[in-house]
Each structure stands twice: as structure tokens, then as C-alpha cells.
């Protein structure tokens, strides 16, 4: 049995190496919203996504982790961050003097060779390094009360602590980007933080709700809260910290308790938001499928009508209203 809480576990080991890969993450649990069949296939055939967006996300997360470890020394935080990075410089076309395009054979060949030569390091471009530092500067310095709150959290929090737990005979894991623990009115409290870089400068409540629902952040928040409570007995808060990749790199902190779990200490009651309800539905589905070793397809979401499962699809409202207005 592995340790239930591990400090300093690498991102690669947490996601891809045994025995940690045997534990289900919130991202893997969310696949059950497609169907158990798809989720099971994904578990049995793991693939490592290496998109530019994911690489940049890892780059920014690592910078924030270094900033937490050296909250009082920004220079050392940057230095530690850079030691784990390899910067790729695209090959140039001798005739034009310009870099080859990302879809050309010359670029792809050079990039693959660079990856092999720098295995274990984060791969970045000069543009990516610059962008991550500008976003970090904005979050930690240039965003008023938000910056003050984040700096305080970094000072007292622990970055990227990996948690592993068995529940109802199944294995689960979660790793907040930052965890703070404190006492309030004589009781132990905790907050879990998740850094998110977003490709928009619209951080209004309406836009943030769209982002949360599009990427399933409400399910992830509930996953972290639920299993943190199972492991520690504490119902934590969950703070989503959004940082725009678009200049001027605005930032906002989002309390996710109305989506997830909210604890009322005065009456010792926990309420479930819609994200917590959806999480629990997916959790129960995973446990059921695992125990029965049965993984139904998308049809399982369609009501059984005497052995017949046919989806009676409803056209979306926007489509219906377009024609109603013409009548």
C-alpha cells in the first residue's frame, strides 16, 4: 500500500507511473459522463496528451509551485523554475531565414529529436516562458486584493501535495495546486487552490460559468472536496484561480462552494451544489461498474422501456425558437 499523502511526487509519476496510475483522477472520472464503456476504454488504453495548451498549463503550474516554495524570493523561484525547462528553438529555412512552420517535416523532425534529448524536462518556447512570467507577475503583484490574497496563500500553503485513497473498494487520487490549513473559531479548516490559465480576457461571472461547465471544473472541485474530507475529516473550501493568457492578464479568484460542497460549521451540515450532485452520480456509476465488471455504453443514459432503449431527442431551444419566431 502506498502512502496516502506524498510531498514532492513528480507530475509524470502521479499521472503515468505505477502504482499511482492505478488510482482514478477527477479527469478520468469525468469521462463517465460520455459512457462507462468509453471510460473503461480510456483507462485500459492510456494516452499521454501533449498539446501545446497542456504543455503551457504545466509550465505555468510549475512556476506557481516554485513561487510557493520561494514565496519570499521571486528571483530564486524563477531560477528553480528555469532549471527544469528546455527551450525549443525552431530550425530556420536557409533560403528565407525564417523558422519552418509547425506542420513542416523539418520542424517536426527537429522537435521530436529535441523531446528525446530533453526527456524529463518541461518543453517551452521563448514566447511561452515570457507569457508564463507575465501571467505570474500579474497574479502575484498587479491585481490588487487578488494578488494580496494569493501571496498570503502561497506563504502559508503547500504546493502540489498528492493524495491517494481507497473508497468503496475503488482507488482515487487528487492533487491540489496549493493547500492551506488554518484554524477558525477553534476548528481545523482547509482551502484547496487550482490555478487555471484561460484564453479570454472576459472574466465576468457569465463567462466564468461557461468556462467551469465546459471543462468540468465543478466536478473536479467536488472530487477534491469529497476525498479530502474522506481522508482528513475536514470539508475544505475550493478556490479556482483564473489567469488570462490575454494581455493585460487579468485574474480572479472563484469560490466553488455553490457548485460543490459547502460546510456550515454552526449546524454541522454539508450542502451539495449541482457540481457535487453530478460528481456523486459519476462516482456511484464508476463504483457500480467496477464491482459488477460491467461497462455499458451511451445507451445506459436512456430510460429502459421494456427492454427498448431509443433516445427521443429534443431539438435545442435556440433552434426551435428560430422557427417559432417566423410563425
Image (spheres, helix red, strand yellow):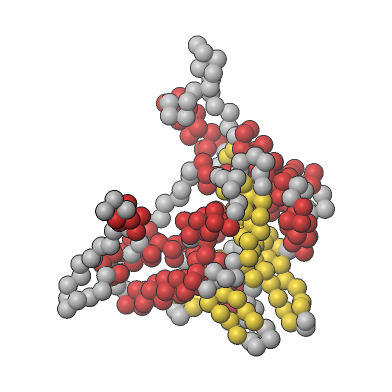
Where is residue 178 shown, x and y percent of the image?
67, 61
- Judge by depth and name the residue closer to the eye, 257 or 91: 257
Residue at figure coordinates x 29%, y 50% from the top left: 326
How far across and down, in percent of the image, does residue 202 sit? 58, 48
137 lies above or below 157:
above
Regarding residue 30, the answer to whether it shows in the image is: yes
Q: Which residue does the image show at 65% across and 39% down from the upper left?
A: 247
> Measuring 51% from the left and 38% from the top, which residue is drawn there?
116
Instruction: Tell me which residue sits at (34%, 59%) in the image.
Output: 317
Quarter of the view holding residue 300? bottom left
The answer to which image quadrant residue 234 occupies is: bottom right
Horizontally, residue 73 falls left or right of residue 133, namely right
| Furthest residue toward bottom | 267
Up-down: is 26 above or below 243?
below
User: As displayed, is residue 187 above or below residue 212?
Assistant: below
Q: Does residue 64 lie above or below 219 as drawn?
A: above
Q: Is residue 173 visible?
A: no
The image quarter in which residue 229 lies: bottom right
* Residue ranking furthest to the right: 72
How many discs mark residues in the rendered view? 0
- x and y, in percent, of residue 125 in the image: 60, 34
Q: Residue furthest front?
A: 327
| Quarter of the rendering occupied by the N terminus | bottom right
In the image shown, does 10 or 39 lie closer to the viewer? 39
Q: Is residue 311 left or right of residue 150?
A: left
Q: Percent from the top left, x then y, of residue 318?
A: 36, 55
Amino acid at each position: 500500500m502506498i502512502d496516502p499523502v506524498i510531498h514532492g511526487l513528480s507530475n509524470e509519476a502521479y499521472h503515468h507511473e505505477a502504482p499511482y496510475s492505478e488510482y482514478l483522477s477527477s479527469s478520468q472520472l469525468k469521462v463517465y459522463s460520455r459512457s462507462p464503456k468509453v471510460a473503461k476504454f480510456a483507462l485500459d488504453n492510456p494516452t499521454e496528451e501533449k498539446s501545446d495548451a497542456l504543455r503551457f498549463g504545466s509550465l505555468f503550474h510549475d512556476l506557481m509551485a516554485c513561487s510557493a516554495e520561494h514565496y519570499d524570493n521571486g528571483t530564486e523561484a524563477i531560477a528553480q523554475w528555469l532549471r527544469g525547462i528546455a527551450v525549443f528553438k525552431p530550425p530556420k529555412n536557409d533560403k528565407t531565414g525564417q523558422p519552418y512552420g509547425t506542420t513542416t517535416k523539418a520542424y517536426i523532425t527537429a522537435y521530436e529529436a529535441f523531446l528525446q534529448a530533453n526527456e524529463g524536462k518541461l518543453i517551452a518556447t521563448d514566447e511561452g516562458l515570457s507569457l508564463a512570467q507575465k501571467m505570474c507577475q500579474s497574479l502575484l503583484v498587479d491585481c490588487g486584493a487578488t494578488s494580496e490574497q494569493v501571496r498570503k496563500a502561497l506563504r502559508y500553503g503547500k504546493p502540489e501535495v498528492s493524495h491517494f485513497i481507497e473508497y468503496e473498494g475503488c482507488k482515487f487520487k487528487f492533487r491540489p495546486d496549493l493547500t492551506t490549513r488554518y484554524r477558525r473559531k477553534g476548528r481545523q479548516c482547509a482551502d484547496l487552490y487550482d490555478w487555471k490559465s484561460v484564453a479570454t480576457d472576459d472574466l465576468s461571472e457569465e463567462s466564468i460559468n461557461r468556462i467551469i461547465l465546459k471543462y468540468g471544473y465543478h466536478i473536479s472541485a467536488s472530487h477534491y472536496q469529497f476525498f479530502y474530507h474522506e481522508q482528513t475529516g475536514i470539508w475544505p473550501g475550493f478556490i479556482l484561480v483564473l489567469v488570462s493568457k490575454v494581455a493585460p492578464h487579468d485574474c480572479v479568484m472563484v469560490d466553488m462552494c455553490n457548485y460543490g460542497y459547502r460546510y456550515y460549521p454552526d449546524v454541522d451540515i454539508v450542502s451539495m451544489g449541482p457540481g457535487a450532485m453530478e460528481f456523486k452520480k459519476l462516482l456511484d456509476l464508476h463504483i457500480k461498474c467496477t464491482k459488477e465488471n460491467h461497462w455499458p455504453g451511451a445507451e445506459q443514459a436512456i430510460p429502459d422501456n421494456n427492454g427498448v432503449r431509443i433516445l427521443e431527442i429534443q431539438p435545442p431551444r435556440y433552434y426551435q425558437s428560430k422557427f417559432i419566431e417566423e410563425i
